[in-house]
Amino acid sequence: MGCNDCKMGEEHFMKIKLFILLSLSWQTLCSQTFYKATEQYFRHDPFKNEFSQFLNNLINDPLLLQKEVKKITDSTLFFLQGFYATHSPFFFPTITCKVVLAERLEYPDSLSLIPVRYFIYQLVGYAPSGEEGLKDVKKEFDKLNQRLRKGLVLSEEKDLKQDNGKSGMIVNYTYNGIIFSPLTIAWTSSADKKENMVVLTVRFIMTNNQAYLPIPFDSP
């Protein structure tokens, strides 16, 4: 093999190596962004421990009030809802924060016989009523998008309408190869501005008693 062939082979190898490094960096950035959302905003992080421990801590949290828990049966999926009077990770003083953990089934396409089972983990911050509360949720909405969108792809941006006016906005982020949106950020306000809310939603899969974000190995 000549020197030119050796040089071309080395260049080809370096290109492959660079592609792998960039792919790993992108996947790492995506996962770090996603995990940052649960670590910084939710009182209980499903990715830190085994899922059963996370679930036990969430259900038995003494600060979680008005708890509603529906355990999984043959006809129903798991559902939990409760309210925090003291836990608030947002910059504005919330009236209360609602947390929801709900199990969902979704078919990847019309030909699939086996659905994908995943969890929706949601935190809703209720701001005071009036214009000031509305400004607070809009400002928090912008902060969340700036902080958590790195490494993810904007898949949908939708205005909410009420009485011919804008009453909120929903932004969904995705990642190549995932059938559900791993991150959703939203704000909404009632017509009389008595209810102003900012909503942070993450979605993940649980397997082998571990919660994780299913990033495909062949993702760019």
Image (spheres, helix red, strand yellow):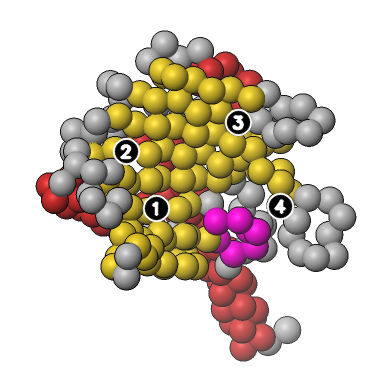
Q: Is residue 2 left or right of residue 174?
A: right
Residue identifier under label 3: 79
Image label count: 4
Looking at the image, tell me whether mark 2 or mark 4 is earlier in sequence order. 4
Q: CA distance from mark 3 to mark 1?
A: 21 Å
Q: Is residue 125 left or right of residue 67?
A: left
Sort mark 3 into few (<14), some (14-19) or many (20+) by Cα contacts within 10 Å. Answer: some
What's under tag 3, amino acid-wise?
A: Phe
Looking at the image, tell me whether mark 3 or mark 1 is earlier in sequence order. 3
**Residue 85 pos. (x, y %):** 30, 22
Q: Residue at x 61, y 56 (%)?
A: 180
What's under tag 2, amino acid-wise?
A: Gly
Instruction: Report the quarter where the C terminus lies.
Output: bottom right
User: In the image, is residue 185 above or below residue 9?
Assistant: above
Q: CA distance from mark 1 to mark 4?
A: 21 Å
Marking on residue 125:
2
Residues shaded magenta: 175-181
What's under tag 1, amino acid-wise?
A: Ile
Residue identifier under label 4: 106
Q: Toward which corner of the image does residue 95 lie, by quadrant? A: top left
Numbered disc 2: secondary structure: strand
Looking at the image, tell me whether mark 3 or mark 2 is earlier in sequence order. 3
